[in-house]
Amino acid sequence: MNLDDYRGVWVFIEQNDGKIEDVSLELLGAGKKLADKLEVPLGGFLLGNQIRPLANQVISYGADEVYLIDHPVLKDYRTESYMSGVMLLAQKYMPEIILYGATPNGKDLASAVATDLVTGLTADTTMLDVDVDNRLLEASRPAFGGNIMATILCKKHRPQMATVRPKVMKALEPDAVRQGKIIEEKIALNEEEMRTKVLQIVNDVTKKAKLADAHVIVCGGKGMGDLQNFQLIHELAETIGASAGGTRDVVEAGWLPHEQQVGQTGETVTPKIYFAIGVSGAIQHVVGMKNSEFIIAINKDPNAPIFDVATYGIVGDAMEIVPKLIEQFKKLKAEKGGELSYA
Amino acid sequence: MHIVVCVKQVPDTKIIKINPKTNTLDRRSAPAILNPYDAHAVQEAVKIKEKTGGTISVLSMGPPQATAVIKKSVEIGADQGYLISDRAFAGADTLATSYALSKALERIAKELPIDMIICGKHAIDGDTGQVGPGIARRLDIPPVTNVIEVTEVNEREKTVLIKRKLTNGYELVQSEMPCLLTVEKEINDIEYSPMPNMISAARYEPIIWAVDDLENVDRSQLGLKGSPTVVGKMFTPPRPEGGKKLDGSADEQVSQLMDILMEKKDLFTLQSTK
């Protein structure tokens, strides 16, 4: 393998039902920085059925080139059909870096493609950079479920690939007059030969989506002590019309379902207001919430790392503070005769 | 019906400590456990076998003491287990791991053809979720990841109906068998092991294979040598400056916080619903 044969930074543009996933637009923003440093074009690649109209949107968000394959068999995501498309594009155009959103489909696709291309893949990245001299992607992620970041390199194989957590990178402001090149490839796919069929897609906007879209989140950690004390989290959330969330420890202890876990292996959230109560602030948690607009931390330990990312911190016992907060909010609601709402 | 479940022994990351000087894992600090997602994978195999009958095998890769997770799987209800253990496998990333496991699966399939492979969604020490789909590609069978329900197994038609979790909901997928599933925790609840399982697990001796016990192995694809990714550096991210800590008694702090929140009209307003 001659590493110098590979040039360009690519982003997988994930679309569902003709709508591009936000994470793909975020990755165009992140990919643009890498491409500029390496002085190569940024490419977006797009697979699906009747998806040509989406190409201009990909360009407006920063791509110089859009590679697309349009085929009825590609209507819904399936590992087999999508990976044959990606293999065709990657082998023909040989990008040096490919980024995918760390969504169920993005991770599935990247894992399959990495195996067939015999190359390295870093999972759930939260920081991206390049070593320009060696043209190496530096993909960093929290390691060991804990308080440390690891930078993963792929030195001798190309393309270098990574999946990237949603809501961690920033999309560029779309530029409607931006110009780019659209390159369309044909693929031979036959529905009869597919070994899997998608029979039905059900959009279920329950708890999980509620947490990801919530304007205010009250998140409790292990510091709440036990399941009974944890009810205070629910009570505060209910009082102020927020969604309740928990750390990995809380979910593993069974105090909350997994859908309500915030962090590396749970949801990444960016609410307007985030209460972190009894949450120490392990890196794997912080990567899932640090982009929240306004963070309030309540913790007994004045050195807890959560205070580093908090806008305001209260050092104190949650069992004492939270009931007072609930009382204050209830009083306020009774005085003004209304519900809290969030702009 | 022959189901093979791939399992991994992992340090309990809830307890593990990092040596702050060397930035490496202090593995002695954490007990080794069966990866929680893999426990659900074994449990799902047990549920399927209750309907279809057949055999459940488990496969793991790791040091000799990883036989503990195979015994644990037998306790949940697996019939037999294999451990591939060899210095040649050490230092493998996800690509080299899926290669080694696929070679072991080929050998298992020679003894008894495999209808389904089940893996946990990811292991809690690496959190990648890449090995399952990798194995499926190497064996050229369809992977179905993030499974939350195995709705129906049709042995006659050799198909399986699956609910697969998506970002905003789920999809109903039909797959041909053999196939590979990776399962979410919510797929089932781990049941208490019946006493006979506990007894057979205590007595069970897993089959251990070294690299020479596997066929057609390209050693350059194993272990550290076969791993395209390397850890460049480990670091603790720079601590951001942090915000303001409120002071005073609990009452004073709460009242300060209320004032701050009420001032943030762009974030937080009280609307009369009267």
Image (cartoon, grey):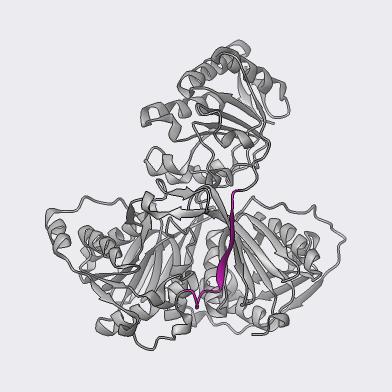
Residue A306: image location, x then y, percent = 57, 36
Q: Looking at the image, is B192 positioned above or below residue B128?
A: above
| B33 is within the stretch colored magenta | no
Residue B38: image location, x then y, percent = 35, 60
Residue A72: image location, x then y, percent = 60, 75
Q: Is residue B48 left or right of residue B262?
A: left
* Residue lying farthest to the right in this orientation: A177
- Answer yes or no: is residue A206 visible: no
What residue do we see at 63% from left, 63% from top?
A: A14
A288 vs B217, nearest the viewer: B217
What residue do we see at 24% from left, 59% from top?
A: B72
- Magenta-drawn segment: B224-236
* Residue lying farthest to the bottom in this orientation: B216
A315 vs B18, nearest the viewer: B18
Q: Is residue A314 left or right of residue A259?
A: right
Give the quarter of the figure containing the C terminus of chain B: top right
Residue B167: image location, x then y, percent = 54, 54
Give the quarter of the figure containing the N terminus of chain B: bottom left
Q: Looking at the image, is B131 positioned above or below residue B274?
A: below
Q: Is residue B177 left or right of residue A292?
A: left
Q: Quadrant of residue A325?
A: top right
- Answer yes or no: is residue B249 visible: yes
| B227 is within the stretch colored magenta | yes
B224 vs A252, nearest the viewer: B224
